[in-house]
Amino acid sequence: MSESTSESARNAVDSMVDAVRGLVSEGINRRVVVRDSKDDVVLEVPVALGLVAAFAAPVATTIGAGLALVGKCGIKLENRQEPAAQPTTTAEGEQV
């Protein structure tokens, strides 16, 4: 009985490891891109790094995102695996 329990626990751990690997791969392939009003890239970071920064310094991350939007910059989440992929999320500052 203990062998089947340890085997099912091992299967659960293996499936969890596969899920984490998939999330890390997806986080590396997706990038947060900040562009200014002239469509020049100001900042481009992998989503995984952005999440680490958001957990490490949430206040600074919030202030930076707010300043980017006030400064008429666009924040986009782009997938780098497909060259013709449309950005999935877009937030742009108000144009004056």
Image: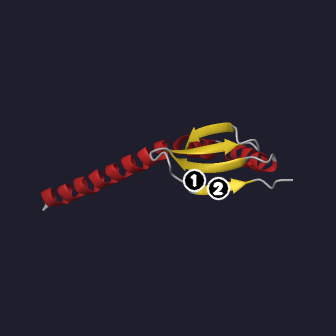
Q: Residue at x 64, y 55 (%)?
A: 90
Amino acid beneath label 2: Thr
In contact (CB < 8 Å): disc 1 and disc 2 = yes
Residue identifier under label 1: 87
Identify the residue shown where x is 56% and y is 42%: 52
The quarter of the displayed image where residue 5 is located: bottom left
Q: Position of residue 17 (x, y in %)?
A: 33, 49
Q: From the viewer's perspective, is 81 left or right of 41? A: left
Name the image colouring.
secondary structure
Q: Quadrant of the N terminus?
A: bottom left
Quick one: SS at disc 1? loop
Which residue is located at x 38 percent, y 49 percent? 22
Q: Residues within 10 Å of mark 1 (few under 14, many from 20)?
A: some
Residue 50 location, x and y as percent? 59, 43
Q: Nearer the viewer, residue 56 or 93?
A: 93
The amino acid type found where label 1 is placed reads: Pro
Q: Which residue is mark 2?
A: 90
Res. 51 mark: none
